Amino acid sequence: MSLTLTDVTRIAKLAQLEMSEQQSATALDQLNGIFALAEQMQAVDTDGVAPLSHPLAAHMNNIALRLRDDVAAEPNRRDAYQAVAPKTQDGLYLVPKVIE
């Protein structure tokens, strides 16, 4: 798939972008380059290739993901925050009804 200059100006108009002829030509070259790369990647035969869970999984057997433990880092101060609220109920803030 490749775009024409007319396509680029139409897309720019739809996106409400003001582009000069030079900018449109530059964008056309860049977009066509991206589409050419996508077509080149789609041409690769990937039948029988299992997806990797990590980019280095093909080269390293045991990859230890360095993720932090899911631990609360701040104390629960809900009671202190709700003490100054006008109305609360069951740990929730009560607000006036806006839409009827």
Image (tube, rainbow, N blue to C red):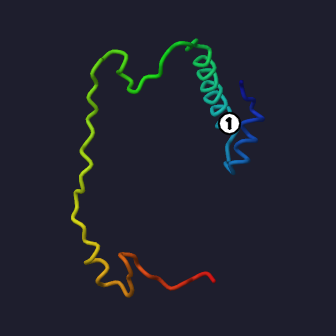
The residue located at (78%, 35%) in the rendering is 6
Mark 1 Cα-neighbour bin, 10 Å: few <14, some 14–19, many ≥20: some
The residue located at (35%, 84%) in the rendering is 85
- From the image, which quarter does the C terminus lie in? bottom right
Q: Is residue 21 left or right of residue 87?
A: right
What residue is disc 1 on?
24
Q: Is residue 81 above or below residue 9?
A: below
Task: Give the quadrant of residue 40.
Answer: top right
Name the secondary structure under disc 1: helix
- Residue 76, percent from left and from top: 24, 67
Q: Is residue 33 above or below residue 5?
A: above
Q: Is residue 95 above or below residue 16?
A: below
Q: Is residue 18 left or right of residue 91?
A: right
The residue located at (39%, 81%) in the rendering is 89
- Residue 13, percent from left and from top: 73, 47
Please state the total of marks drawn on the protein image: 1
Amino acid found under the numbered disc labelled 1: Ser
Depth order, front residue of 67/11: 67
Task: Give the quadrant of residue 86.
Answer: bottom left
Q: Is residue 16 left or right of residue 38?
A: right
Q: Is residue 2 above or below residue 24?
A: above
The residue located at (67%, 32%) in the rendering is 25
- Residue 69, percent from left and from top: 24, 45
Name of the residue lying farthest toward the front: 90
